[in-house]
Amino acid sequence: MKLKLRIWRQANADTQGRFQDYNLDHVSADSSFLEMLDLLNEQLIQAGEEPVAFDHDCREGICGMCGVVINGLAHGPARGLTACQLHMRHYKEGDTITIEPWRAAAFPLIKDLVVDRSAFDRIIQAGGYVSVSTGSAPDANAIPIPKKNADLAMDAAACIGCGACVAACPNGSAMLFTAAKVSHLGQLPQGQVERHNRVAAMVRQMDAEGFGGCTNHGECSAVCPKLIPLDVIGQMNRDLIRAVLSR
Amino acid sequence: MQNLQVLSFSRSTIGKKVIMAVTGVIGIGFILVHMYGNLKVFIGPEYFNAYSEELRELGAPIFGHAHALWIMRLILIASVALHVWAATALTIQARKARPDQYAVKRTLEANYASKLMRWGGVVIFVFILYHLMHFTWGNIHPDFIPGEVYHNLVVGFQFLPNVIFYLIAVSLLGLHLYHGGWSMMQTLGILSPRYDQAVRRGAAAFALLMTLGFAVVPLAVLFGVVK
C-alpha cells in the first residue's frame, strides 16, 4: 500500500525540529510499524539522505525500547501493543500517518523520534529494588505468597518502562510507571521492610525529574502496552499517605 | 527515614492532590447542605427567611450568635484557598512537564468532566464570587434587602442571563463533582478496584442530583412556580 508519512525530524536537542512529509510505496500489510520505518530508511539511505532515528531493540513487544506517538496515540491505535507489534494491516491505502516522539520535559529529545528516558532509571535507582543479600537462588515457594498478591505483583511487574504513560498523559505525569514499580514490590513479602521509604523516595525522584501530577484522566493505562491498571496509582497514593502518617 | 523528612506533603505532587481531595470533601459537604437548604424555598417565604436567620443560631447554646456559622465559613474559605492553590501549582507543573505539544492530539479515556476540571474550576470560582456579590453582599443585585432572602432570590432570578449563568455554573459544578468525586477516592487510595465502577456510578449519581437540586430553584422562579 501507499502511505503518506509526516515524521518529526530534529537533528539534536539544540536545534529546531519540524515535520517532514514522505511518500512511501509498497508497504506490506503484514509488515510491522517499525519494518515500515525500516523500508523508509532504506530508501532514504539509498537517496543519500539522513535516515529517521527511532528506538527499538527486541521487536517482540517485551523490551520497552520502541515507542512513538502515531496519529496522536502512544504506540498507535491498537490497545496493549508496543509500536513494534503494531502491524500495517491497521492502515489502508492512502492513509496519512503522523509520527512524533514522546513529548515531555523529563524526556529530552536526542534525535528525531528518540528521547532520553534516563529519568525512569533514576526513579528506579531511588528505591525500586529490594535490598537483600545476594547468594544462591532461594527455593521456590520458600516464602509463601498469597495467589492474589502474586497475581497483582505480576500485573504491575509487566511494566517495561517504555514511557508511553508519560507520553499520553496530558500532564506529562509518570504516575503509572512509578506506581507500577511501587506496587509490584509492595505486594510481595520481600518488599515490606522498605515499603514506606521506597514509595517516598521514588515519588520524590519522580517529582524532581519534572514530571507532572496525576489528574486521573486514565490516558496512561489506555495506551500502556502491558495494560497496567490505574489501580496501581491508588495503591501508591495509599502507600505514600501511610508512609507520611507513620513517620 | 531521611527520605520521609524531606517529603513535606505540600511539596510533592501527590501531597498537593491529597490537599485537593481533602478540601474537596469539605466542599462536597457544604454543597450537599447548601443544595438541601435551597429546596426550603418551595415551602414558602416565611419558612425560607426563618431558615436563613436561624442558620446564625446554629449550634446554640454552645455556640453564640453566628459563631458556628463563622467557624464553618472560615473552614470553607481556607478549603477553597488551598484547593485553588494546589490546583494552580499542579497546573503550572503540568504545563512545564509538557512544554511542546503534539501536532495530533487524541484521547481514549479522558472525558468532558476530566478535561474540564481546570477551566470548569476557574468558572466555578468566578461564579462563587458572583454568587456572593449577588445574594450575600447584594452589590450586583437590582433590589437587595438584607434578611429578605426569599425576596432577593425571586427578584434575582427574574433576569434571564443571570439564570443562564447559574445553570452553566451548576452544570460545570456537576461535571467537577463527577470527576472530582471519583478522583478523590483514587488520590486518597481508599478505592478498592472491586468497587471502582460502583464509585464512578455513585459519583455520577451524586453529581447529577446536586446539579438538578441547584438548577430547580432558578428554573422554578423563571417559570413562575416560586414567586
Image (cartoon, helix red, strand yellow):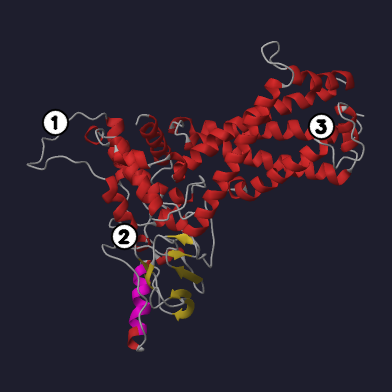
Provide the residue span drawn in magenta: A34-44
Give the label on residue B129, or none: none
Pair 1/3: label in front: 3
Residue B20 seen by the camera: yes
Give the label on residue A142, or none: 1
Pair 1/2: label in front: 2
**Chain for numbered disc 1:** A
Q: Answer yes or no: are tags 1 and 2 on the same subunit.
A: yes
The quarter of the rendered structure image containing the C terminus of chain A is top left
Q: Seen from this angle, which residue lies furthest top? A: B61
Q: Answer yes or no: are tags 1 and 3 on the same subunit.
A: no
In the displayed structure, A41 sits above or below B65; it is below
* Residue shown at the point (36%, 58%) measured from the top left: A82
Towards the viewer: B62 or A193: B62
Q: Seen from this angle, which residue lies furthest bottom? A: A48
B94 with respect to A116 (left or right)? right
> Residue at label 3?
B217
Q: CA distance from mark 3 to mark 2?
A: 56 Å
> Residue at label 2?
A118
**Chain for numbered disc 2:** A
* Residue shown at the point (53%, 36%) measured from the top left: B21
Q: Are marks 1 and 2 in contact (CB under 8 Å)?
A: no
Towards the viewer: B94 or A226: B94
Towards the viewer: A160 or A194: A194
In the image, what residue type sits under mark 3?
A: Val
* Percent coordinates x, y for residue B83 in the rendering: 58, 40
* Percent coordinates x, y for residue B30 in the rendering: 66, 29
Q: Answer yes or no: are tags 3 and 2 on the same subunit.
A: no
* Residue shown at the point (56%, 46%) measured from the top left: B87
Query: Which SS does the magenta portion mostly show?
Result: helix
